[in-house]
Every structure is written in C-alpha cells, then in structure tokens.
Image: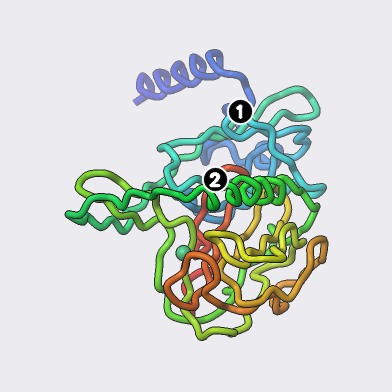
C-alpha cells in the first residue's frame, strides 16, 4: 500500500519535472481543487466534435491564446470561440500564455462524425465551365473572400443561434456523394426547403459583409453576415435580400427571402457557416429544429 503510493508520488514528481508546471494545472485532477488552480484552467461549453463549435473561458490572466499554433482573439471577459472543421483530425491544441509568462495547455479530443455518404455507380459529371462562367467566377470568389476577411467586432458569436427559417431539411451539412469511388465535394451547409418568398431571419447578431446586388453564378443572391471572432454565415439562393452591406442586424430580424436563384433546383435556403477556415455545421449551434 505504502509502497504503491510512493510509486505514484515518484511518478508525479517525474511528470511535474518533465513538463512545465502550468501543464499540470491544465489537467489538474480531483486532488488539486484549490481556487488558484481552478482559475488557471480552461472552461468550455459546446462539444468537441467535427463541424462543431465551442465557447471557451480562458484561464485568469491570459495574455494571448493560440489554437493549433494560430493566434486567436480573446474577448475582454476571457471568452473566446474555437471550431472544428468537418474533416478535423482527432485532436487540437490550445495554449494560453499568462501575464506571468506561464503557459496553460489544453489538448482537445475531437469526436468523429458519421457523415451521410452516398455511393453512386455513375461517373462524376464533368464540369466544363464556359468562358463566360469563368470570367464571372473569379470576381465572385474575390468578393466572397473579401467578405470573409471582414472582422466586424460583432458579439453575435456569443449568442445561442436560432434557425433562420423553419422547413424540411432537404440537405445536411457534410453529406457527400462518391461517384464510382471518386468523391465529390461535400455539402457545405444545411438546406431548408420552404416556399418561394418565405422570409428568413438572422440566426444571431451580426454585420452584413456581402449583399449581392445581382445573382452570383452558383450562389444566386448571396448574403453574408459576420458574427465576430472569425465566425460567419452565408445564405444562398435568396429571391430577395432585405439588408445592405455594413448594416448591423439583430438575431430574429428578417434579412432575406427564400428563393432558387443561382444553382438550385427549387426554393430553399442554403445556410453555411465558417469559423476562419473551418467549415462548421449550423445545426450544432442551433440544436434540432422544433
Ligand atoms: Zn445546399
């Protein structure tokens, strides 16, 4: 008995010596419940899952934060957001540097998802794009990139997201077709089928970063909203956009009407979300539709 606890103590001593002291705080066990050690831990709400989002509380005294080696912003009260790409690997690494120079590390295990994959025994459609399409596409992609680069300072990222519209889910995030073994690109958003002209609302507060004045080749009338901290939404195929670029919108405020402009077979709202380069699943921010 005594011998065993000595062994544990010896192991603790070894691991404490082998890693920076702050690391022990980040993973501190039940035996280390002092208020000080609680304060230097990360806190999280949300699920570490592919396509998912987590809101974090940085340890007290955090001066800067990196996620997978990239600096990420922290709000005045220590809150921050991280998200996991549809194809994120098994783990991600969060590091806070404190005012006193110590670092607090958190390794996050990311749960895999089972995506809706459909194997079809036809060849992938060869997409030969016309010269006219290509001439339009470049500037469109530039506009989308410029809209994503806007960081508005919106606090919408801190809110619980609501569904922009209610209707049948006609396409799920992440679903993918494999054509004779050749994977097509996965579905980047969620499709909500509803009647032409149905109003849809802002799922959270934000600032309009793109309100297309004429339909894009694929997206049709495209509306993009920045929710702050690198989190943004895009709404595709609208019959009408009700807001203008630079406008602040509130959660629940009507921002557009559902349509089938661009590449769409019927009226639906395609809602996609990104956090920086990560494509995320809107349903993980809203919860199931009731
Ligand atoms: Zn879609």
- The tag earlier along the polypeptide, 2 or 1, is 1
Taking the image as shown, residue 260 lies to the left or right of residue 208, namely left
Which is more toward the observer, 185 or 79?
185
The image quadrant that residue 3 belongs to is top left
Q: Is residue 165 above or below residue 283?
A: below
Element class at badge 2: strand
Q: Residue at x 34, y 54 (%)?
A: 176
Q: Residue at x 55, y 19 (%)?
A: 16
Q: Residue at x 69, y 50 (%)?
A: 143
Q: Residue at x 45, y 48 (%)?
A: 86
C-alpha separation, residue under disc 2 versus residue under disc 1: 15 Å
- Residue labelled with disc 2: 278
Comparing labels 2 and 1, the label whose residue is closer to the camera:
2
Which is more toward the observer, 251 or 30?
251
Which is more toward the observer, 227 or 223?
223
- Residue labelled with disc 1: 69
Could you tell me residue 145's position as x and y percent? 66, 46
């Amino acid at each position: 008995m005594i011998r065993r606890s000595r062994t544990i103590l010896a192991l603790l001593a070894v691991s404490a010596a082998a890693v920076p002291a702050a690391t022990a705080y980040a993973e501190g066990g039940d035996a280390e419940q002092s208020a000080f050690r609680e304060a230097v831990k990360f806190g999280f709400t949300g699920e570490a899952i592919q396509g998912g989002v987590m809101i974090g509380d940085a340890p007290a005294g955090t001066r800067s934060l990196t996620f997978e080696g990239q600096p990420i912003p922290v709000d005045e009260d220590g809150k921050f957001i991280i998200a996991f790409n549809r194809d994120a690997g098994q783990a991600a690494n969060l590091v806070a540097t404190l005012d006193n120079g110590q670092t607090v590390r958190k390794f996050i295990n990311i749960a895999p998802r089972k995506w809706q994959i459909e194997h079809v025994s036809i060849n992938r459609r060869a997409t030969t794009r016309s010269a006219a399409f290509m001439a339009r596409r470049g500037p469109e992609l530039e506009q989308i990139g410029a809209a994503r680069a806007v960081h508005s300072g919106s606090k919408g990222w801190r809110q619980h997201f609501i569904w922009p519209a209610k209707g049948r889910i006609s396409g799920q995030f992440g679903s993918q077709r494999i054509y004779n073994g050749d994977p097509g690109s996965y579905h980047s958003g969620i499709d909500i089928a509803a009647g032409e002209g149905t109003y849809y609302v802002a799922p959270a507060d934000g600032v309009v970063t793109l309100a297309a004045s004429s339909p894009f080749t694929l997206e049709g009338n495209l509306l993009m909203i920045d929710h702050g901290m690198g989190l943004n939404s895009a709404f595709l195929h609208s019959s009408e956009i009700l807001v203008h670029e630079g406008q602040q919108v509130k959660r629940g405020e009507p921002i557009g009407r559902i349509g089938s402009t661009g590449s769409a077979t019927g009226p639906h709202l395609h809602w996609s979300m990104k956090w920086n380069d990560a494509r995320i699943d809107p349903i993980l921010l809203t919860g199931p539709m009731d």
